[in-house]
Image (spheres, coloured by chain):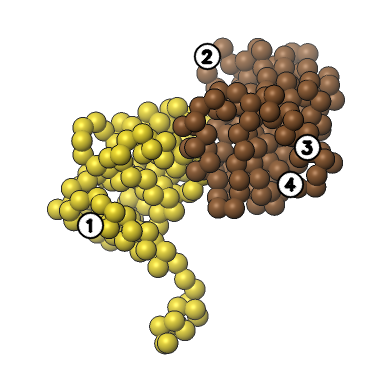
Chain colours: A brown, B yellow
Amino acid sequence: MSLRLVRIDDRLIHGQVVAGWLRALGAKRIVIVDDDTARDEFLREVLTLAAPQGVPVEVCDVAGGAARLTQLAATTEPVIVLARSPRTVLALRQEGVPIGVVDLGGMGFGPGRKRLHRTISVSPDELRELRELEQLGTRVEIQIVADDRPIPFGSLDSGR
Amino acid sequence: MRAFGIVIAGHGTLPAALLSSTELICGPIADTAAIGLEPGESPDHYTDALRAAIGHGARRVLVLCDLLGGTPFNVASAIARRSPRVVCISGVNLAMAVEAVLASGELDDGLVERLLEVGRDGITETERHRTSRAS
């Protein structure tokens, strides 16, 4: 088994995730892997409030997340994994977490960032990290909502 | 006279449309703002917009959000957790919005309870509603 949805989204839990993806996957658990959030009790609480009743939210740092996700990946439980950045997902992959596909769901535009697709922009570092993920055998796709047809990252990454 | 401000927070044009529809029922409404999250807008940018609408000072503000767990709710609940003068409710509908804008006096626990009740009470299906009216 592997994890059903590993999504990079700088908003973490939000409308597209709770109203769309949870239902589409029948997922009953959200695992957030983010070092900053794991350290911040207030952020953790606000994210827990964002999930519907009956959907536990676990917030882990990268080390704790790698252990927890390796455990969850061995079960059949549909889980949604959220991270803010490619760096986190790459670190999880390097720790041996089986991640077949990573979904780019929301990466905001800003100075020094290149727009790959409507709401998906990347910094030069993030671009490198995504390429490295693909070299490790993880498919990188853009799929904003569950009904969208996934767009392969390779088709938008002209620079390689 | 209502002693608190109201901000409707939600996705896209829903807040502006809900405010305009509420005015259709209640007439022109003072001290109410509608802040819509645009596609691609960052939570930080939305936080600034919502903070500006809530304003400074000691006045209490009720934020009515469209979707539990959506960015407008997440941002509003983070503000409310840090600022006791702000109250954040999710799942707003027209019945709740009308009740809120027509409320008089303070934004207290009693009013919050009433708004939650009015919001829920308006959700039914004709046959079920008919049966429960008959009994």
Residue B57: x and y, percent?
A: 21, 32
Q: Residue at x 37, y 52 (%)?
A: B18
Other residues around mark 1 within 10 Å, as few (<14) / some (14–19) / many (≥20): some
Residue B38: x and y, percent?
A: 47, 36
What residue is pinned by disc 1?
Answer: B103
Q: Residue at x 41, y 40 (%)?
A: B77
Q: Quadrant of the C terminus of chain A?
A: top right
Say which amino acid is labelled 1. Answer: Ala
What residue is pinned by disc 4?
Answer: A78
- In the image, residue A98 sits, relative to residue A57, either above or below, namely above
For discs 3 and 2, the disc positioned in front in the rendered view: 3
Other residues around mark 4 within 10 Å, as few (<14) / some (14–19) / many (≥20): some
Mark 4 vs mark 2: same chain? yes
- In the image, residue A76 sits, relative to residue A98, either above or below, namely below
Secondary structure found at label 1: loop
How far apart in space, not on screen, are marks 2 and 1 (Cα)?
A: 45 Å
